[in-house]
Amino acid sequence: MLGNFTYCNPTKLYFGEEALGGLDAELAKVGANVVLIYGGGSIKKSGLYDEVLGKLQRAGKNVAEISGVMPNPTLDKLYEGIEIARAHKADFLLAVGGGSVCDYAKAVAVSVHCDEDPWEKYFARFEEPDCEILPVGCVLTLAGTGSEMNAGSVITNTRTHQKVGHVFLDEMVMPRFAILNPRYTMTLPHYQMVAGIYDIFNHICEQYFSGTDDNTSDYIAEALMRSLIVSSRAANKNPQDYEARSNIMWTATWALNTLIAKGKSTDWMVHMLGQAVGAYTNATHGMTLAAVSLPYYRHIMPYGVAKFRRFAVNVWNVDAEGKTDEAVALEGLKAMEGWMRELGLAMNITELGATAEMIEKLADATFILKGGYKVLDRDEIVSIFKAAL
């Protein structure tokens, strides 16, 4: 392990088929004015909306609602939510939905009492909150983002075609609690399920493909990836497999609650590339990551060949005897590609709506980070997008 770090994660998790029972005790700890935040209405069809609203009413809460939060929450939607929360004099925000709904709730939480424009402060200058932060709780219905146990938020500015994530340093941005019932994820379409699975996998990869030291965090990451591969195959065959879906949900949380990032650098360039595609196409987040991953990893593999060899052997069980490190590493990426195709993931950006004419704009919209094995220049980014078509 390298460097010094502090680890604190204050989110309380309720996990399992009876997890929603924990909401009663948590509501007793918060103020009277609650804003219920959710997406397109699937929670009403499933009955979850009625269950949650009933608990809020029995707890004596005054409830306002922000509905229609989209998979890629927009800045305009953020402004709308801020106004609703201010008008309601909100004490607490309850997000019921997937990672985008949780992300959105955290963005509202840091913006309601902010005197500045939240886009400029948080997503352009990447500053930290210096105002009161509203507490957030999450009832999760989709496994993928890990937003239920971290301080991250992603917002899309449709005017500038930028999709920007900010991982806040203040632990008060993290949800106070999260309710994780794997049954809630079983109503999702197959496309959303596998997109979420790849989102989980890539979160681990972004933290794994960096550094050269012998790091405990990498061993944990390998175990999480192996578990996810097994569970994803089971869920792909039978989406109603509770054991598989529960393992996927638990892995998603631990993939991005900051644990496996400790003591090491991290990459996140796949996310930068994928978010640029998402900003222009509004494609599902996990699918944008899948579409750019292999071109990116093949490009940087020569600069981190030892880790890619380890990935092949420890995650994909590639036989390394008598082979060069590069050959083993390439076999690992081939095995990963086979798994991705098996799940039915998007394998190129063309099928997500991107075109060759967009590539220069996609490159301009891609933030360049420095934590991975190769710091990309703009020409390399263009080359990767071309390979991803």
Image (cartoon, helix red, strand yellow):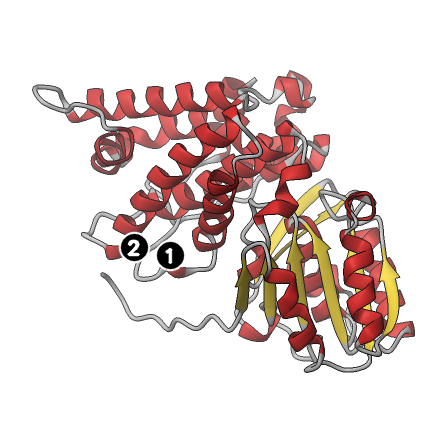
Amino acid bearing label 1: Ala
Separation (CA) of disc 2 from disc 1 = 7 Å
Image height check: is 330 above or below 14? above
Q: Secondary structure at mark 2?
A: helix
**Image point (69%, 44%), residue name:** 162
- What label does residue 261 carry, if any? 1
Q: Secondary structure at mark 1?
A: helix
**Image point (28%, 29%), residue name:** 316
Measuring from the top left, give residue 301's x and y in whole percent.
Answer: 31, 30
Amino acid bearing label 2: Ser
Image height check: is 217 above or below 321? below
Which of the pair 254/298 is nearer the observer?
Answer: 254
Which of the pair 318/113 is nearer the observer?
Answer: 318
Which of the pair 98/141 is nearer the observer?
Answer: 141
Horizontally, residue 247 falls left or right of residue 37, namely left
Measuring from the top left, give residue 92's x and y in whole percent.
Answer: 75, 74
- What label does residue 210 carry, if any? none
- What label does residue 217 carry, if any? 2
Measuring from the top left, give residue 329's x and y in whole percent.
Answer: 25, 26
Which of the pair 17/285 is nearer the observer?
Answer: 17
State if disc 1 and disc 2 touch (CB < 8 Å).
yes
Residue 267 visible at all: no
Report which quarter residue 334 is drawn in: top left
